[in-house]
Each structure stands twice: as structure tokens, then as C-alpha cells.
Image: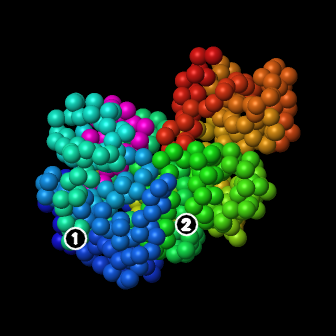
Amino acid sequence: MPSAHVDTFARDNLPPAEELPVFLLELPGLQFPEQLNCAGELLDRHVVEGRGERLCLRAPGVHWTYADLQEKANRIANVLVHDLGVVPGNRVLLHAPNTPMMVAVWFAVIKAGAIAVATMPLLRAKELKAVIDKAQVHHALCHASLAEELHSAALQCPRLRRILHFDYRGPDSLETLMSRQSPQFENADTAADDTCLIAFTSGTTGVPKATMHFHRDVMAVCACWARHTLRATEDDVFIGSPPLAFTFGLGGLVLFPMAIGASTVLLERAGPVQLLEGILEFGATVLFTAPTSYRTLAARGAELRRSALRRCVSAGEALPISTRSLWREATGIELIDGIGATEMLHIFISADESEARPGATGKPAPGYEARVVDDDGHVVPPGTVGRLAVRGPTGCRYLADERQRAYVRGGWNYTGDTYLMDADGYFFYQARTDDMIISAGYNIAGPEVEEALMLHPAVAECAVIGSPHAERGQIVRAFVALRPGQEESEAMVKELQDFVKRTIAPYKYPRAIDFVSALPRTQTGKLQRFKLRADGGTR
Ligand code: 3UK
């Protein structure tokens, strides 16, 4: 396939062929042409087919049609090519909160055949530098409000030649350059297997990894889980909290709505309060957010019941049974749980409302296969806990990283999770592989104990880890944030311990309980158990 990449960095740094996962492309809808630019499919196609006047992006004070977005993206693509000298295959760093301009710059980069490297708004200079160095970035487009950290990073990154700022008025702004460029742009004629985005893992531990995804992969995730499980329509209005630099957010807030000509609401801040306001103000119908956010939002069930909301997707972390039922009771809506990963681009095991089973993530999404295996990679019988291995149209390609050999073995992607499959083929999340607690010879999955604790009315949030113990190897230690008005006392410790013993097998109860005001989380909302483990050891 003729690559459009003049700069061959991405292709040169792909894992060797024998370390790649198997890619399954048989499903109808996955037969992609050799030349494919996903921006053409997701954006230009709607204008060509006469849907240019349909609403595409909403934000406070912003109302862009597909034609509006196309015009902005084309002007920015011209700026990239003519003012900055970007050539196909170059990496362009994007640093912005979720705003319409962030979507426009994303499409501009893809249209130009370059590679979008989106970064979380909260990243500090040190983390931005790591991204710039790893992805060998020469150009950056940055939201004016986030300029400072990127500038300090740039001082230590001689490679970064140029930063343009947007969402501000100034003679040197991206908007000024855009106004001088043509609203027409001919997309780079990229190969379906040219890399179009590099996504960094959020990393609950260790050094972030850079994953590479092709134009074809972007279209594949739209054709699999989104088409078959989410089944949204062109009249749906999407909304959600994950940053667009997190592939959960990119898919849920840009790729999936635009694949079907629907519209999406972008919120710069998307805590539970802003989400609720956004849902009501913009009439959102499809919500993407994390389990903790559903837990908090459930308190506003009465308002949500009167809203247009109809489909709610939970991912990023295991969905506690208690959160699923809380949400159903509060809003009348059954959550769609789905496990996804940056390496896989999006969700690969899930269940829609009608198939959902409490405690189960679901079944492999159309196009994907999943199995539970032992340490040697052999499939274990149903009902046995083991490692999750998956394959499908998307899969792991780390950029120059030896951890590729740990994630992909024998053509399967190992997500680092332990799972159990029941006799009906439903997959039940247990824990991260390295979060299994081994206490006095028992294997205990932290999330199961968390689940039990969260059923207690006094508990707002909790996290369970194994902490070192002389006789037992490890003991189960819980960090608990109580609901307002509850007392952090010895009596409460005893109460919670007894409650867990009554709820699950007694040997799993937390022998130590620490009260905390909040739990440490990543910018993608994941619990950072390693931070608690570091604390837990010293107590
Ligand atoms: C965990 C889940 C249980 C699991 C992601 C949807 O989370 C995403 O990607 P990350 O690379 O993390 C991947 C890891 O997160 N996880 C995610 N969802 C679930 N565990 N139930 C779930 N529903 O450990 C997985 O290996 O940050 C999620 C779409 C795109 C994504 N990138």
C-alpha cells in the first residue's frame, strides 16, 4: 500500500512483525480501501453527501455544523502545511481542554496526513517533555490557557520548533493565520495503514507508553462496538467527561458521533455538576463517563429522569454492582459497561442494556475475540480466574518499546487484567494482574472487597490494596472515604469489617482500614493503587 508519509518515523518505529498482534478484519464493515484518510470518512463525507448544515459540535456559546467544522479544519490544515511546513508523517502535539477548536485541530492534523499526539490538559512540563521526546514532535498547537506548561517544556526540547496558540485573539494566534488561508483543502492520500494518532497510556504505574493507531483502526472502532453495541443514531446528542487525549473520550465524543452524522457537546470542565448542567442545557442523549462520576451524578436522578438522556456508557475502571443498581434506580437507565484500553484504541468487551448482567463487563464486542488463559497462555475452563487475552481489528503497537513483548504474546493482546468467563460466555473483571492480593495463601481481588464496602451506606469511595504483613505475606487494607456526616471511629472500622464479612467470604475482610478524605486518581479517573501501596507500607 502506498504510504503518504514523507516522514517515516512512525513506520520505522513499529514493533517488528513477529511481535504484532493478529488483526481480525473479516467482519463486514472492516474491508477498508487501501487508501483511506479517516478525516474524509468522519467529516468531509457528511458535507459531500449533503449533510453539511447538520449540527456537529456544541459548547457553551458555540454551534458548529459539519460544514463549519470542515471549513475550520481545512484552514488549519493549510496553516500546518503552508505556514509551518508540516509534511505527512510529522507528529503534531495537541494540548487543549475539550473544546470545538481541539476537534478542529485534530482533524486538521489528520487531513494533512500528519500524526495527532493529543495530551491531557493537566500534564506538567516534565510530562509534556517526555511526550515530545518520545514521539519526536516538531510542532504543537496549544490552547492559550495551557501555554505556560508547554512553554517550559519547550525550553528543554530543542526539537520542538513551533507552537501556535488558539482560542485567543492576537496577531500571532492560530485564528489569525487561519483567516489568511483557504477554506479548501485536499486531504493527504494516506494509506489505511498509515499511523494517524499516537496515544499515550495514562499509566497507573511506571513510564507512559506510546501506542500507534492507523486510519483503518479509527474506522474499525466505529464499525464494531459503536455500531453494534452503542447503536446511536444521527439524532443523538453525545456528551461526556473524558479528555479527547484519552481514547475513551476521542471515541465517545468525536469518532462515534461523527461516524453517524450525530452531534456532540464539548465541556472544558466536566465534573458531575457541569455534566448535569450540560445534559439539561443541550438535551444530551448519550453519556460517556467513569463509574465514580455515575455514582455522584446518581444523586441528581430526579432531574436526569426529566432529561433526554437515554444511553450511558461506563468505562475506564470496573463498574461496581452497587453503582450499576444505584444508576438504574436513580434514572431508570441500565448502564452499558465496556472495557477498553489505549492499546486497543477503544472498547472490546461490553454488553448493551438488554444483555447487561450485574458484575459482568459483558461479552466480546463484534469483531473481537477474548479468552481467559493461565500463565502459560493456555485457555482455562469457565469459572476459572486467569489473564485476559483479546484480539480483533485493533491491537497494540507500542512505539519503540520493549514492553510490546509483554503486551502481545502469540498474537493475543494481554491487557494486564485478570478475568473469569462464566459458562454463558460473560466476562467478569477480577483485578489488574498486579493488584491481586495474596493473603495467607488466599487470592483476593481488591475490587471485590471494594464492591462489598461500597454497599455500606456510610461509604462514599474506597480502595483496597494488599499491604505487606510478616505472617500473612499480605493483608487486605482498605482506604475509605466516608459520606459527609459519618464518623471516622474505631466503631466504624469494626462496623465496616463485620459488614464485609457478612457480604462476601469472611477471609476477604479488610484487616486494616484507613480513613481518607479522597483517593488518588490519574487524569483519566483511574485509582492509583500504587500510591496507596507506597503509603500503606509505611503505616
Ligand atoms: C481498565 C476497565 C474494568 C482495565 C479505555 C475505554 O480505560 C481505558 O484505557 P486505559 O489504557 O486503561 C485500560 C485498563 O483500564 N478498564 C477500563 N475499562 C474497564 N476495567 N472494567 C472496565 N469497564 O484495567 C484496562 O486494561 O486508560 C476505556 C475506551 C478506551 C480506553 N482507552
Question: Relative to the observer, which residue lies in front, 516 or 269?
Answer: 269
Q: Which residues are magenta?
A: 114-132
Residue 216 in the figure: left or right of residue 303: left
Q: Which mark is residue 184?
A: 1
Residue 433: mark: none
Amino acid, disc 1: Gln
State the residue lying farthest toward the top.
539
Q: Is residue 122 magenta?
A: yes
Q: Which badge, 2 or 1, is on the more N-terminal residue?
A: 1
Q: Is residue 481 above or below residue 355?
A: above
Q: Nearer the viewer, residue 75 or 272?
A: 75
Which residue is identified by label 2?
Answer: 237
Task: Residue at 50% x, 38% y: name it.
Answer: 522
Q: Position of residue 133 (x, y in %)?
A: 25, 39
Please name whichever residue, 358 or 57, is drawn nearer the observer in this view of the structure: 57
- Relative placement, left or right, of 164 versus 465 is left
Q: Quadrant of the C terminus?
A: top right
Q: Quadrant of the N terminus?
A: bottom left
Instruction: Describe residue 510's horizontal placement relative to residue 430 as left or right.
Output: right
Q: Give me the residue at 35% from left, 71% from top.
A: 67
For the residues labelled 2 and 1, the Cα–Cα distance comes to 28 Å
Residue 299, image x, y percentages:
74, 47
The kind of residue tagged 2 is Val
